[in-house]
Amino acid sequence: MLFFKKNRQKNSFHLPSFSQWSQFFKILPKSEKILFIFLVVIFLSSLFYSISAFYYQNTEVIPNEYGTLQEGMVGQPQFINPLYAQNSEIDKALLELVFSGLVTYDNQGKIIPDLINEYHFTDDGKTFEFSIKENVEWHDGEALTMDDIIFTFELIQDPVYLSPLQGYWTNVEIVKNSEYKGFFKLKQPYSNFMDNLANIKIMPKHIWEGMPIQAILASSELNLANAIGSGPYMIDSMVQGQSGKNKRIRSITLAVNKNYYNKKPYIQKIDITFLLQKDDLNYLLKTGALDAGIVDNGAYNSKDFEKVENKEVANADYFAIFLNNQKENISNKKIREALSLAINKQEILNELSNQGYIVNSPILSEFYGLPLPKNTNQFDLEKANSILNEEGFELKDGLRTKIIKKSTGFELKHDLKLGDTGSEVKKLQECLAQDKDIYPDGTVNGRFGDLTKEAVIAFQEKYADEILKPSGLNKGTGKVMGTTIKKLNSLCFTVPEESNQLTIRLKTVNNLTLKKVASKIKEQWEKIGIKVEISELSTNDIKKTIRDKDYDAILFGEKFGSSPELLPYWHSSQIFDPGWNLSVYQNDDLDKLLEKSRLFSDGMDSERIIILDDIQNKILEDYPAIFLYSTNYNYLLNKKIKGFSTKKVVDQSRIFDNISNWYMSEKRIWK
């Protein structure tokens, strides 16, 4: 204590007391007060800036694990089950969220591993060897092993279970090497094997083993309310009406799978509302009651949908007019060319609010970045009209009509008179005998006698205006010559001219977008004088129409995977049901190219791309179809949701392929 007192006495400087500090501002002049406050503000600002700079330099922004996505879908789920989900876009979308496959797609529509850890092809592409991740669990905590994968594929291959996927796997053998390794054995390499693989989601053997098909189909608990998968989300709850129409499923809530083996999603829940009509979806997106949903082309307008933005996603579908090559007029290549030249594709795309892109190729070059075809079939009305004129279809009353002259194969050529005999006299008598008033006797004997002469006179006088008057005669002569021969030939030996009017029966699905397009096609073809009859059919009726090939032209779509597979659509073997050669087109050289294009393990192999280019050019040379457009999916997503990066998908259900990257809020963490 003495030490501190001494020091206190010796030191002339000491801190002011609180009471002294309280008098500070009273003793400072005004100018010094202002200076002091200014310096304090500068000091505090500098301190705040330094602390902030330090914080921001040593932290980073990352998505936060937070939030519920309110998704809307039009329709009803039936099977969140890998065996049967392929028949419904809703079921497939739910399958993507709840289940996992060996491979999946990235945000560019390319195949990437999912459950698979490593893979490679051997035996010239006929064997696919792979291993799977060892840390995968089902939603109920059981381990996922090769036994589940073998079980899934054997169930799909078994015709008893009636899976729509069964046809793709009939000639494929799957073998287990160990708990986490196995291989597929193919009869021959197949370029779209990986796409077929991406369509399979693995089923839990411990849940479904030993269950007959009737039990599988009847189990709404396992198919919907408590479907057990291994995907990024798991079934949390399901809301269903009580009775009658209200018994429909109103919503399903998915919760994030905390034990997911891949990158865990940031969005913690997805609440999916199932709606009756597309208008309901549009309304709820406009009001902000829903965060996301796919709407029809033309339904989106940025002024109406203020809380969401349109994420246009390209897809591997396209629409075309397939011309039935078996029909009389359309079997003519020049007519098909004229029909093609009369189509203004940009005008059709404008009708769809430009939400897509023009397609000029059967291999969808625009989507896959493949070489464009040599013949892109540009719009040219003048050339289309010229071709139709050359083919004998002239404009008659505004319609393209071809006059067809026909003959019995015989005509009177020589003058005939009383006393003549022969085959021409016999033909003359047969002609006269057709009218009993002119030749009541009707004798046909090849001799020009008095009765035949009297019949000729009666004939001449009946048609006096055409036969006698031009020669200044009032009475018949009984001689067959000049105008008499001409009239006899026109009545008896010439079949009346037939007119072949160029009419196209165009059929399509009863769908709002396709109805618009069909109407535009009709308008464009009518500009070159072609009559168009449009039929809009139900899904069931269009299937029958395709099976029976009961159309001149059909407006329809085709779908590809991560690479184009054309054999089902263009090989001559696919003309008959259940094939999809809608143009009924046959070309032996093309068949060989199509068969060759399949024999690659990699669908985008450089050699295969050369073959695909040959295929597209060969098809376009013959004009069997008019390729029109591909429409983008319009996925409306709330502006608060970030991380959506999908640019291309192989079908609508793949819109959730990168959902693990979506997020609704952010946070900072120390580096």
Image (tube, grey):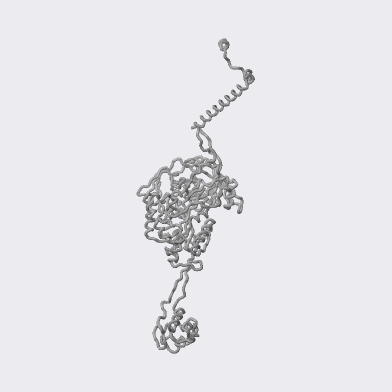
The spot of residue 528 in percent (x, y) is 48, 63
In the displayed orientation, state which residue is furthest to the left.
Answer: 123
Residue 162 visible in the snapshot: no
Q: Position of residue 671 (x, y in %)?
A: 48, 32
Q: Nearer the viewer, residue 132 or 536?
A: 536
Query: Does 660 sit above or below residue 439?
Result: above
Of residues 271 and 142, the one nearer the viewer is 271
Q: Is 193 in front, or is 478? A: 478
**Which quadrant, please, contains the N terminus?**
top right
Please identify the residue farthest to the bottom as the structure is shown.
Answer: 450
Identify the image quadrant of residue 334.
bottom left
Q: Position of residue 56 (x, y in %)?
A: 51, 32
Count of picture labels: 0
Q: Is residue 288 above or below residue 373?
A: above
Residue 545 or residue 334, whichever sits in front: 334
- Residue plotted at (39% across, 60% down): 587
Q: Is residue 35 left or right of residue 360?
A: right
With 595 as the anchor, is 468 left or right in this view? right
Q: Residue at x 60, y 47 (%)?
A: 287
Q: Please tell me whether residue 477 is drawn above or below residue 408 in the rendered image.
A: below
Is residue 201 visible from the viewing direction of this image?
Answer: yes
Q: Position of residue 523 (x, y in %)?
A: 51, 61
Relative to residue 273, is residue 425 depicted above or below?
Answer: below
